[in-house]
Amino acid sequence: MKDKPNISTVKRVITLLKGGWTGKILWIDLTKEKSTIWKYDPSMALHYIGGRGFAIRILWDHLKPGVDPLHPDNLLIFAVGPLTGFPLPSSGKLVVASKSPLTGGYGDGNIGTKASVMMRKAGYDAIVVEGKADEPVYVYVEEEDVTIHSARDLWGADVREVHRELTDEYGKDSGILTIGKAGENLVRYAIVMSEEDRAGGRPGMAAVMGSKNLKALVIRGEKPLPAVDEKTIKELGTKAYKDIKGAPMYPHWMEQGTMMIYEWCQENSVLPTYNFREGFFEEADKVTGKVMAEQYKKYQKGCPNCNMPCGNVAEARESYKGTKAEMDYENVAMLSSNIGVSNMDDVIKLIREADDLGIDTISVGSAIAFAIEAYKKGYLKDDDLDGIKPDWGDASSALDIMHLIVERKKFGEVLAAGVRYASLRLGGDTVKFAMHVKGLPITAYDAHVAPGMALAFGTSSIGAHHKEAWIIAWEAQYGFEKVDKTKVEKVIELQRIRGGWFETFVTCRLPWIEVGLSLDYYLTFMEAATGIKYTAEDLNRIADRIYTLVRGFWIREYGYWMRSMDMPPMRWFEEPLTQGPKKGAHLSLDAYNQMLDTYYELRGWDRNGIPRRSTFDNLGLSKEARELEAMGVELTP
Amino acid sequence: MMIEVVVLGFFQDYVGKKKIELEIEKPIAIRDILKRISPELAEYIENHPENSIILVNGVSIYNMKGFDTKVRDGDKVSIMPVVGGG
């Protein structure tokens, strides 16, 4: 792809990339069975950093507007950043992005995996896949050598099997990204998997892989990572690792990981329960981080370069004895309280099954809860669910529904397209309890009492997700009941740092958010890696550019926009909590609208959530604004 | 007069349990409750106020009188770190 035009719309700069970035993107066309190395315009690196910044820039420039996400023309992007892979805290991450088959808008996710480090060592800042193979294949990348192999024997195999087979073939240190049956069957929330339990790309990135007949991507390389000042990275990295180990929270974190928030959510009535109908689960005591750590935990696993591994692997003790799964708060909450299940063995089994099938645990937890509620309210009949009679707390029927979805049998076919689509098909009140924003199911925080978290879900750039403005802990301290500008500003601050900085570096946000590693480290890391001195303001501005371009992409693909798309489901406004200490609480529509207005104003977007012309211009996106206007989108000055 | 104190997360390491029933003679300030249940925890919270959440009947003390907020008979106090979760 040497002939690709300069892709940056911002002023061309002649600076050559001295370090941090490799300056190269591998572009693989599965239809033509060809790959090309693209030396991209350095201004993309300077103005978008990497990760999701590269992803949105590439999608905007190279994806034909209006393409069906499961069409061969859709682009699947794996992107790392200038800090990925260096010996600094939790740098083993990559972003996988595409136009989402679940939401129809911008979709991405990040995943901790050796594949991130290997992509860097192979010499690339990103790998883009377009086209579609004639038959199931996997792609092997070893630096400049790119080969396409038949995956006929792997098709239908579960995630762990594929991982084992490819590890046997290419060695333990190879980076392997794969899909399970859910991706093959184009379930629209199939997720990309690595190293058996690591997952990324909730908005159906694995369905895009499946649509391309791409079962796996294997990456190896031995090139040194480019750094301007390697010594500083090493020294400062060592110091940062020490800071992490010395943090007061560290021992507790190492014991429970993200599961430590389970009882915290219960205490604050934000634990998703019965399809987000409640925020308080009467049997929460059986599923807490403490119970997991003391009775079920076997060992811990993590990503490359991480000294605070979050993967707590637990083993079932009675039913499903011996089954092991990685217990993360999100997975656990969505497949326990949210479907009424309180037996830890059952939760472990549900997570294991979802991971093996390569389906997003959060979205499938939401789909199962939706199906239970729809069945109990008479919207679904026995035959729709192939004889399954789902109920709250019944893990066995929940497993059956998961399989119905992955096999796309009966109503599983509809549920495989997500709860938004399922509610549109069923109609009536189901729209109120389809718990999503922009088609992406809400992650594990009930927001009846938490307007800040509701706004975070409403305005997250991929649809409802906590990875950007995870405001809930701050909000508890600041006061759930408060609805003011400070809270909205906090949402934007978190979106900038979590959704901007870390998603472009690309490194894990957890050292900062979980144990309080100072953000100052990252500015120095960036300078040491790239030789460029970025200030916090620079990085915030880049994050704002990315958010506005992502919003532009949604508008481009949808053809219109309105503020209702930035609203959480009506359940939280209209159906007050009936259980727990905050009984009676619900969100206020007026208050939410007031916060949303403030959010738009601070972002420089109009009252419908469309960025103003002047905002595009100020962020160096005038060309993109003109493209939207040419499509008939009216931009407010 | 009784109050219920719930301690979560690693703050439990300071007090050894999750729930404590406290007998009080008259309304008592949060600062004094902390000292009573664990002087070490009180010191930690004093030094790291940004890392603690204290609620009285579900409302953050930062929206009342901070550490001077008075707790009365039958009130529930929740003391927890600003935990992570992803």
Image: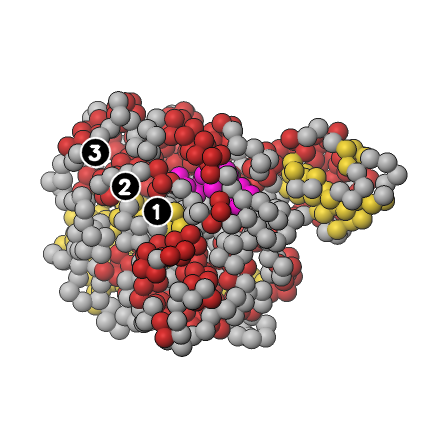
Indicate the amino acid at tag 1. Lys
Magenta-tinted stretch? A446-460
Viewport quadrant of the N terminus of chain A: top left
Q: Nearer the viewer, residue A386 or A118?
A: A386
Is residue A87 depicted above or below B68 in this figure? below
Circles 1 and 2: CB distance less than 8 Å? yes
Q: Nearer the viewer, mark 1 or mark 2?
A: 1
Question: In the image, is A115 to the left or to the right of A292?
Answer: left
Location of mark 3 (residue): A633
Image point 49% across, 34% down: which residue?
A: A591
Question: Which class describes the residues within 10 Å of circle 1: few (<14), some (14-19), or many (20+)?
Answer: many
Is residue A311 depicted above or below A597 in this figure? below
Question: In the image, is A525 to the left or to the right of A337?
Answer: left
Mark 1, secondary structure of its residue: loop
Q: Nearer the viewer, mark 2 or mark 3?
A: 3
Image point 39% across, 36% down: which residue?
A: A500
A154 is within the stretch colored magenta: no
Is residue A389 depicted above or below A427 in this figure? below
Location of mark 1 (residue): A438
Q: Is residue A144 visible?
A: no
Q: What whole-number distance in Å separates the C-alpha atoms at marks 1 and 2? A: 10 Å
Give me the chain letter of mark 1. Answer: A
Give me the chain letter of mark 2. Answer: A
Location of mark 2 (residue): A554
Q: Percent position (x, y) of residue A584?
A: 59, 47
* Earlier sequence position, callout 3 versus callout 1: 1
* Earlier sequence position, callout 1 versus callout 2: 1
Circles 3 and 1: CB distance less than 8 Å? no
Give me the chain letter of mark 3. Answer: A
